[in-house]
Amino acid sequence: MMRKYRICLAAVITAAALFTAGCGGGAASAGTAPPMPTETESAAAATVTETETTTRESEAVTEEDTTPAETEEYPKGENSVRTAEELAGKKVIALTFDDGPNTGVTNEILDVIEEYGIKASFFVIGQNIDPESAKAMQRAHSLGCEINSHSFTHSYMDQMSAEDIADEMERTSELIYEYVGEYPKFFRPPYIAVNTTMYDTIDLPFIAGIGCNDWEDRVSVEKRVRFLTEKCPEGCIILMHDAKDNEKTAEAVRQAVPMMLEQGFEFVTVSELFAAKGITPAADKEITYSYATENGWS
Ligand SMILES: [Zn+2]
């Protein structure tokens, strides 16, 4: 289903091309792949599927009104990315959240981000974006956070055709651009399920990260805090979830952030993490990144 998002394909390609320009060989220790977190968010995925029809209907309304709600409160535009010089000597770490945006948990996490003046990156699901949830996304962007793509329907994209994969990406990218004025720079595959068709079709670097199964309710707040404060080394991408109802992660972030600041961590966006380590993430290679360090990426 190509729909009218095709119209904006040129813009997407231009943005992707700009971003990937210069991607050559990474500085890299390609050797050992880190353990990939296996997302098993079946419950969340089921919810997503159920609401798909509704979301598409409301999205159709948005399409007709070609001027999306411009809010004075959250100006659009490109967020600055701190350079390697600005981040030199800092113990950088990238906190990332999947499965938003929403008006609850996303905002609770943003309260912590705002309170401590830190940055994070949000990998949003296109079909979760509506005029209300978009305000949380705009708020995140206005706080210097990075808004990235986690697909449109949160499906197993390794089972999709190239055309459907492209459609997932374009629709989400355009929605992000409409609301925050900046295209996503990274992609996190749903369930970290990837294949060659996805790598060939998606013009963004793929991101995984390390996590603590925080989509499972049985993982206590204490365990999440311990993971954040004891298991996340410098240079890692932390994979958490700001899914609706994931109050435990919001609470864990509230408790862990001040402790991590005490440990000397500097919270950076995914772009800044790579910049800090002098690594140009590749969108044209079959790589899914979880770490960026002085010794390269993995
Ligand atoms: Zn997800």
Image (tube, rainbow, N blue to C red):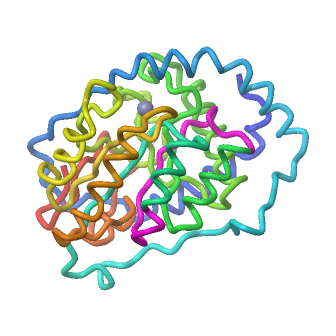
Q: Position of residue 177 (x, y in %)?
A: 67, 54
Q: Is residue 259 magenta?
A: no
Q: Position of residue 285 (x, y in %)?
A: 33, 44
Residue farthest along the right direction in this orientation:
64
Q: Position of residue 151 (x, y in %)?
A: 53, 34
Residue, x 35% and y 54% (percent of image)?
254
Left or right of 263 on screen, residue 187: right
Residue, x 26% and y 61% (percent of image)?
93
The number of numbered discs placed on residues in the rendered structure image is: 0
Residue span colored magenta: 113-131
Residue, x 35% and y 45% (percent of image)?
207
Q: Position of residue 68 (x, y in %)?
A: 82, 51
When the figure is inspected, residue 7 is found, relative to residue 256, above or below; the finding is above
Q: Quadrant of residue 214?
A: top left
Left or right of 248 on screen, residue 177: right
When the figure is inspected, residue 191 is found, relative to residue 232, above or below; the finding is above
Q: Quadrant of residue 48?
A: top right
Q: Is residue 119 magenta?
A: yes
Left or right of 43 on screen, residue 38: left
Q: Quadrant of the N terminus?
A: top right
Residue, x 60% and y 52% (percent of image)?
137
Residue farthest along the bottom direction in this orientation:
85
When the figure is inspected, residue 167 is found, relative to residue 132, above or below; the finding is above
Q: For this rendering, which residue is in front, 184 or 109?
A: 109
Q: For this rendering, which residue is in front, 25 or 53?
A: 53
Q: Quadrant of residue 84?
A: bottom left
Assign ligand 1 to one image quadrant. top left
Q: For this rendering, which residue is in front, 222 or 282?
A: 222
